[in-house]
Image (tube, grey):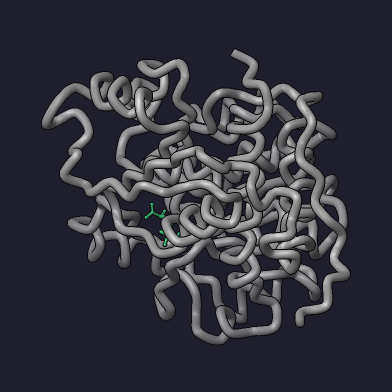
Amino acid sequence: MTPRRAPAPTLPTPTIKTPKDFLSLVDFDAAALDRCLELSAQLKAGRVLGRDAPTAQALASRHVAMLFEKPSLRTRTTFEVAVCELGGHVIGLTPDVALGKREPVADVARNLERWVDAVVIRTFSQRLLEEFAASAPRLHVINALTDEEHPCQIVADCLTMRERWGTLRGRTLAFVGDGNNVASSLALACAMCGVNLHVASPDGYHLPTSAVQRATAIARHGARLRLFTDPADAVAGADAVYTDTWTSMGQEAEADARRRVFARFQVNEELMALARPDAIFMHCLPAHKGEEVTAEVFESPASVVFDEAENRLHCQKAILLMLLTWAPDL
Ligand code: CP
Ligand code: NVA
């Protein structure tokens, strides 16, 4: 029998403001993000308790639908396992639901609201996701990636950094590559957590101005966001180096052009040597070895990529508990 020594996770209490939906990192304020990370760590430690965990029936008789309009390994699997381990039921919708094409987005939302408690959606447009969530006031909607944001990924990344460093405040993270959905959510989280973020991108691929403005507006504890065009400048002295694919889902037609534009932005051993000696390497995955990262860096002891992937599970459990079991602040 498995030894049962891990601390039991406690169910959250509604003392923190929680939103109806988690569409953007900023749907959590700093206190909610902090609580989410605490709860994620507790759930991780308590997973060994299995069906004896106090959260094992937290979502009993609750239904969570999942709609993915883009491919996924990690997000889909971890949400399914998370709902199952919280005692809930998952419904995998097929992409032929075709948000906004077969019937209006608002009608899909208003149908689902009558049957299920939450929907996890991976789609293209953040605006469409917002329209969906606004159309169904009783349905909890979770962003599983849009062209603009990937908030669940970044909560898991914050947990991964906390596990390494204890506290995030005052650290410096360098993101090397496209100013994409992952980079935008990272900018918001770093600002909230007091982490300095250096983003190195080629001209024309910088973080969107809207993300820079939002991150700057919510910055705490002196967190500074700086944009660079030379990866070496961004990485110098950093505590962590993060990269992502040069070609995000939906941009496949641009792949060849992007390979040329981003060639100078590869994370390799030479670049990692400019960071702190104990710097970690991060990637949301899937990785393209030989493009945005070399196999040597990906496989090196500095690499925490599979910790990030594991933490998706624990953090998404925490997000589900916060949204579905705390009184929403509508
Ligand atoms: N990192 C991430 O979201 O992975 P998937 O695309 O496989 O879900
Ligand atoms: N930026 C990538 C992230 C994949 C998890 C994409 O959108 O395809």
**Looking at the image, can residue 309 be seen?**
yes
Q: Residue at x 35, y 23 (%)?
A: 114
Q: Position of residue 231 (x, y in %)?
A: 57, 61
Relative horizontal placement of residue 187, taking residue 98 as reference (left or right): right
Toward the top, the furthest residue is 330
Q: Position of residue 20 (x, y in %)?
A: 55, 23
Above or below for 254 versus 196:
below
Quadrant of the rendered image containing residue 85: bottom right
Above or below for 240 versus 189:
below
Q: Residue at x 37, y 59 (%)?
A: 72
Quarter of the image where the C terminus is located:
top right
Between 267 and 163, which is closer to the camera in this rendering? 163
Quadrant hosting ligand 1: bottom left
**Looking at the image, can residue 236 be seen?**
no
Relative horizontal placement of residue 146, taking residue 300 as reference (left or right): left
Between 321 and 23, which is closer to the camera in this rendering? 321
